[in-house]
Image (cartoon, coloured by chain):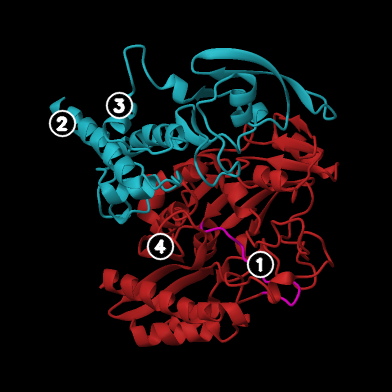
């Protein structure tokens, strides 16, 4: 797409259903493109080294650390940020559950927690295992969704740190939504 | 971060030619380690060659068949994301140690980004390597190693040298070492296969040279041979936190037990050496011996006889022994 001596170039980023034409230094991460070029400051920069999860967004539905994803390498992806998670009708169920459970103190990690949890619920529904033992034992049937208990959620959310220590209520909020989803699935 | 160019060639031959012909060029796959190292100033490529679009990203049966009931092996594309590898039903059922190892590493977000090829070539997390204000023989050859008299609690007890005691950080590679994986490489002369046991170098006097790969060599796939008793395998990782932390000691093992006697065993250690450490001395002790904790301990002792710990990580010798005995005992129990 370029000659190898150019260190910046034009590219299209697709974010929350809109396409944005940008000219970016190739050093720009998706995180910096969102915050500094698109004005989408819901996604937060915590450690900037892939360790804290505050920058978590969805790329083609999968949760990723946007601080380690170069924008130029993400030009084919559909990015979803915390701003794109809610529907026009109201909050995403996880957003509502975080409010109801008071699952935050300073709130800085919250957009990353919610984006991560949204994708995590999908991973469990797709039957993805985790290091929490139950879903990894080979004898357990592998088809079908993983039932999310507290141990599963703690393990699956370990890439999102909260320095205020709001983990107890973060866990409760995610358990609420996971339970609602399981009941809705049973009722179908 | 130093400015860099960016290219996304269409095929492996073009990508290989680009990196082989330019000393400052580097392959970019998931980027979870490379982009971080670029931010730290440890890596400073002047050209990134994005290979995510050209690497195979599927898992295929190798269909060896008819070889005494071993079943089929697997060929894993180098572009397969860690999370897809761990979720694959054939991996989970046939090689549980591999699924467990992948899931023991990093976080859900990082596993979604990180590729199999990149995982094999990730760099050590030794604090001195990652801090450009400190000497480090691996990052700046000849500058010295402050770890020997400094922070080395989590460094190597096996296979290191006076010049470097860094550990290889991968969990996945430990399971692949136990499973006799073969790495498929595309180089300037075309494709070739390298056994995983021949991919990594010990540091010796050149800790900056970590693998036997040449400039421009691109890992395109990892193949696991058929191994029926790999169904009875496990990966156990001991670390400072319950999740999302690099290992202090880890063990991958597969055990073939018949009537209380070990027919064959596969054993590899992680977080204790500059490379995923295949424990062949222990395997030799185990073959034909009773599947008991006493013999598992003797096997572990045989492997760890070569341990040469630093003052601050001598505890890893005992820990490695205990984890080996524990994992083998559990596998023996599961098989009986």
Please tell me in which quadrant of the rendered image residue B312 appears.
bottom right
Q: Which residue is mark 2?
A: A186
| Residue A1 seen in the figure | no
Q: Which residue is mark 4?
A: B230
Please tell me in which quadrant of the rendered image residue B332 appears.
bottom left
Q: Are marks 4 and 2 on the same chain?
A: no
Kindly identify which chain the residue marked by label 3 belongs to: A
* Nearer the observer, A164 or A40: A164
Report the mark closest to the observer, 2 or 1: 1
Disc 3 packing (10 Å; few <14; some 14–19; many ≥20)? some
Kindly identify which chain the residue marked by label 1 belongs to: B
Q: Quick check: A179 above or below B151? A: above
Q: Quadrant of the C terminus of chain A?
A: top left
Residue A16 in percent (x, y) is at 49, 18
Q: Which mark is residue A96?
A: 3
Magenta-drawn stretch, dominant element (helix, strand or loop): loop
Q: Secondary structure at mark 4?
A: helix
* Nearer the observer, A156 or B11: A156
Kindly identify which chain the residue marked by label 2 belongs to: A
The chain that appears red in the image is B
Q: Look at 79% across and 37% down and name the residue there.
A: B47
Q: Secondary structure at mark 1?
A: loop
Residue B306 in percent (x, y) is at 60, 84
Q: Which residue is mark 1?
A: B166
């Amino acid at each position: 797409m370029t000659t190898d001596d150019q260190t910046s170039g034009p590219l299209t980023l697709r974010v929350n259903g809109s396409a944005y034409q940008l000219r970016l230094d190739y050093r720009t991460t998706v995180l910096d493109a969102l915050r500094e070029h698109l004005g989408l400051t819901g996604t937060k920069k915590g450690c900037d080294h892939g360790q804290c999860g505050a920058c978590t967004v969805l790329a083609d539905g999968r949760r990723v650390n946007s601080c380690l994803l170069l924008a130029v390498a993400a030009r084919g992806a559909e990015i979803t940020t915390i701003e794109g998670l809610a529907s026009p009708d109201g909050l995403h169920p996880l957003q509502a559950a975080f409010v109801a459970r008071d699952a935050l103190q300073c709130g800085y990690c919250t957009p990353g927690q919610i984006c991560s949890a949204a994708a995590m619920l999908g991973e469990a529904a797709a039957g993805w295992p985790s290091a929490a033992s139950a879903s990894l034992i080979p004898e357990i049937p592998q088809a079908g969704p993983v039932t999310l208990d507290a141990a599963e959620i703690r393990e699956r959310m370990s890439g999102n740190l909260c320095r205020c220590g709001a983990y107890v209520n973060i866990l409760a909020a995610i358990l609420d939504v996971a339970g609602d989803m399981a009941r809705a699935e049973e009722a179908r | 971060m130093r400015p860099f160019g960016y290219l996304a060639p269409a095929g492996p031959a073009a990508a290989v030619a680009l990196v082989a012909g330019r000393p400052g060029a580097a392959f970019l796959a998931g980027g979870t380690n490379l982009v971080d190292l670029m931010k730290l100033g440890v890596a400073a490529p002047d050209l990134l060659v994005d290979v995510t679009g050209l690497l195979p990203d599927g898992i295929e049966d190798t269909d060896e068949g008819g070889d005494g009931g071993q079943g089929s092996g697997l060929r894993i594309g180098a572009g397969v994301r860690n999370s897809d590898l761990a979720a694959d039903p054939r991996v989970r059922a046939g090689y549980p140690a591999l699924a467990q190892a992948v899931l023991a590493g990093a976080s859900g977000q990082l596993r979604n980004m990180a590729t199999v090829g990149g995982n094999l070539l990730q760099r050590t997390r030794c604090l001195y390597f990652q801090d450009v204000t400190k000497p480090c023989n691996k990052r700046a050859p000849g500058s010295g190693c402050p770890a020997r008299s400094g922070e080395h609690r989590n460094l190597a007890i096996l296979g290191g040298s006076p010049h470097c005691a860094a550990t290889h950080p991968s969990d996945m590679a430990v399971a692949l070492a136990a499973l006799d994986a073969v790495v498929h490489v595309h180089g300037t002369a075309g494709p070739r296969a390298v056994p995983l046991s021949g991919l990594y170098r010990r540091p010796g006097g050149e800790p900056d040279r970590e693998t036997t790969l040449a400039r421009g060599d691109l890992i395109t796939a990892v193949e696991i041979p058929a191994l029926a008793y790999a169904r009875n395998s496990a990966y156990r990782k001991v670390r400072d936190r319950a999740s999302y932390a690099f290992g202090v000691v880890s063990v991958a093992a597969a055990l073939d037990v018949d009537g209380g006697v070990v027919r064959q065993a596969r054993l590899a250690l992680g977080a204790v050496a500059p490379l995923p450490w295949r424990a062949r001395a222990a395997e030799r002790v185990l073959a034909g011996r009773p599947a008991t904790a006493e013999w598992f301990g003797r096997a572990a002792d045989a492997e760890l006889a070569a341990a040469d710990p630093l003052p601050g990580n001598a505890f890893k010798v005992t820990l490695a022994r205990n984890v080996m005995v524990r994992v083998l005992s559990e596998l023996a129990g599961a098989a009986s």
